[in-house]
Image (cartoon, rainbow, N blue to C red):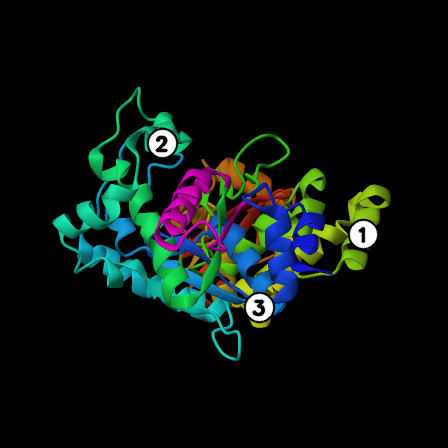
Amino acid sequence: MNIIEELEWRDAIYQQTDAAGLKELTEKESISLYCGMDPTGDSMHIGHLIPFMILRRFQLAGHRPIFLMGGATGSIGDPSGKAEERQLQSMEQINRNVESLRAQLEKLFDFSGENGAILVNNYDWTKSLSVLDFLRDIGKRFNVNTMLSKDIVANRLETGISFTEFSYQILQAMDYNHLYEHNNCRLQIGGSDQWGNITAGLELIRKEHGDKSKAFGLTIPLMLKSDGTKFGKTAGGAIWLNPEKTTPYEFYQFWLNTDDRDVVKYLKYFTFLDEATISALAEKVATEPHLRAAQKTLASEMTTFVHSQAALDQAIKISAALFSGDIKGLTADEIEVGFKDVPSFEGDKNSELNIVDWLVALKIEPSKRQAREDVTNGAIYINGERQQDTTAIIAAEDRIGDRFTLVRKGKKKYHLVTYK
């Protein structure tokens, strides 16, 4: 099917500036299209994948994606979706972020071949632009009344908006016009909050190149969970693509825990599985929800895409061990990943105590009486194995990789003892 038809089936289109024209253009020729990202941090999170998966789908359909890094716009701040001014970053920090994000993009997407992706930085074509040239050549093209009417500005008028952020839409319009002129870019995509910025770019292209210029805009629906909360946010914060910020195991678990009401939507949006496969999984959600086949498929597809098959295998191994309680087969590194959020206690490698004294010394148990009672009743597990001998000595052989001892009280209450 045509790429636009595929996006419609995947419920991935919110608004288009000219739906019929874009569909006709993509059927006739291979186009270049772009989406921008401001380098406000040193890692992408899963929210960034929302527009970027659309770029990848266009690439698979024979078109060329352009990833625009906002080295210039990121130094100003996009007012879209913000109730107050952003905190400005130094250019040194922005440049470091650009390089980190560049490495992530090059890992995830295909930059080789006939329609290989292109990575550009808008700082390159704005750094030498003088204030007078900006005002005379670009600013003259924009009507303040029109700019004030756009939601991205209008929503901030009561609380206030600086001239800096007010000018953001002009810089983004310059980006689209530059890519139109130098890369034959015909389409900009973005989130639903970017409609005003996208149409500003189209207006600049029209004024620079005439009414017959063919350029288009497409926005993506706001991604909300079924409970109305924002997609990608958890109690612990954002789900990052950097494995040092969000481990592959945590990343896998995020997708695995998707609500039944959301999983088919996410399969359509984030995976490259075909309609027949997703329809079959949707049927399983309806008839066999307890098996969580759709969630397992989603988690596997996304973890492999963002990290690797090896990372997926490790995440599945840790998940299985935690579910069964049999953690003897886990390495110290896997223990560290799987139990990073459980209460942690520092043990002494040089001491050998019986289990009752050891539990009390670490403050895992409040008293010797309670410790003896829990051990005797079979409530204490050391590294996954039940220990009911109150005279047992906790020694070096009870340390996994000489770094950890895992204590479980009851069915699910874990404690991690670490050794330096």
Looking at the image, is 383 positioned above or below residue 259?
Answer: below
* Residue 146, quarter of the rendered image: top left
Distance from the alpha carbon under mark 1 to that under mark 3: 29 Å
Which is nearer the N-term, disc 1 or disc 3?
3
Mark 1 falls on what kind of element? helix
Task: Identify the residue under disc 1.
Answer: 279
Q: Which mark is residue 413?
A: none
Which is nearer the N-term, disc 2 or disc 1?
2
Residue type at mark 3?
Answer: Ser
The reply, left or right, for residue 346 in relation to residue 93 is right
Residue type at mark 2?
Answer: Thr
Task: Identify the residue under disc 2.
Answer: 146
Mark 2 falls on what kind of element? helix
Picture residue at 70% right of the left edge, 53% below the top: 5
Task: Identify the residue under disc 3.
Answer: 30
Along the viewing direction, whichever of 195 and 205 lies nearer the viewer: 205
The reply, left or right, for residue 324 in relation to residue 29 is right
Which is nearer the N-term, disc 2 or disc 3?
3
Picture residue at 71% right of the left edge, 61% below the top: 273
What x and y, as percent, mark residue 99?
Answer: 31, 65
* Residue 265, quarter of the rendered image: top right
Which residues, given as a range, are shown in magenta?
192-219
Mark 3 falls on what kind of element? loop
The reply, left or right, for residue 137 in relation to residue 387 is left
Distance from the alpha carbon under mark 2 to that under mark 1: 44 Å
| Magenta highlight: main SS | helix
What x and y, as percent, mark residue 106?
Answer: 44, 70
Label 2 Cα crowd, 10 Å radius (few <14 / some 14-19 / many 20+): few
